[in-house]
Amino acid sequence: MTTNGWIQIVVFLAVLLAITKPLGVFMAKVFRRERTFLDPVVRPIERLLYRVTGVDEEHEMRWTEYAFSMLLFSGATMLLLYLLERAQHVLPWLNPQKFGAVPPALAFNTAASFTTNTNWQNYSGESTMSYLTQMAGLAYHNFASAAVGIALAIAFVRGIARKEKETIGNFWVDMTRSALWVLLPICIVYALALVS
């Protein structure tokens, strides 16, 4: 390995170690629903999302309801991605190359892999997927599947920590908080770093 490669590994590990404690403390506050510096900006958006979707943020779920909610969300978004891939040739937006429908097996494989955050790609994106499919389908799943993963990790920790309680939180709240308080700010900071 080159010196540059070793330097990159050391810098990556140093940054990772430096952000572990502050990010962990911040995430603990977010999922315990304690006040954070992002609340003035993000909390109104969160309340609006709950109002629009009919989510009761105070409702605690048993593990079966939590798992069902996660499977329902993942199944519905996987189906929508599959349909988007299959119908991209008839959709009037963002397909200047006039790509045809993604074949059924490839569409299912891609939808399943992006929904489960494995992101296995058996195609060349620039010659198979329209811009709309890549933006509204694949990029959305990169974000949403990470939020689902964080929510499940939080529920797992709560399940271990809450020995006397039969509930593990609310999937919709955990996923929303994962997206708004954790992933979105990280994406914004990272995008600004890339742009600079």
Image (cartoon, helix red, strand yellow):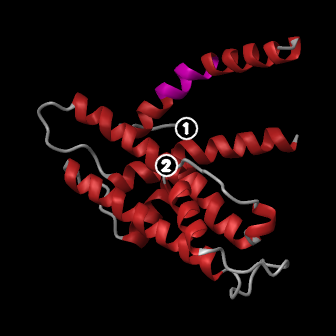
Q: Earlier in the sequence, mark 1 or mark 2?
A: 1
* Overall secondary structure of the magenta section: helix
Query: Badge 2: few (under 14), some or many (20 or more) residues near its Cα, within 10 Å?
Result: many
Residue for badge 1: 37
Between 173 and 78, the one lying in front of the other is 78
User: Helix or strand or loop: what does disc 1 sit on?
Assistant: loop
Mark in the foreground, 1 or 2: 2
What residue do we see at 84% from left, 79% from top?
96
- In the rendered image, which quarter contains the C terminus? top right
Q: Position of residue 78 (x, y in %)?
A: 48, 66
Does the rendering let one see residue 33? no
Residue 1 on the magenta span: no
Q: Quadrant of residue 156?
A: top left
Does the rendering let one see residue 142? yes
Disc 1 and disc 2: Cα gap in Å? 20 Å
Q: Are marks 1 and 2 in contact (CB under 8 Å)?
A: no
Q: Position of residue 107 (x, y in %)?
A: 58, 69
Q: 138 left or right of 70?
A: right
- Residue type highlighted by circle 1: Phe
Residue for badge 2: 147
Residue 20 on the magenta span: yes
Q: Where 25 sits versus 39, above or below?
A: above
What residue do we see at 75% from left, 61% from top?
125
Q: Range of the magenta residues?
A: 18-25
Q: Quadrant of residue 111?
A: bottom right
What residue do we see at 74% from left, 82% from top?
93
Return the residue found at the far left: 164
- Residue type highlighted by circle 2: Ala
Q: Position of residue 55 (x, y in %)?
A: 34, 64
- In the rendered image, which quarter contains the N terminus? top right
What residue do we see at 42% from left, 31% from top?
28
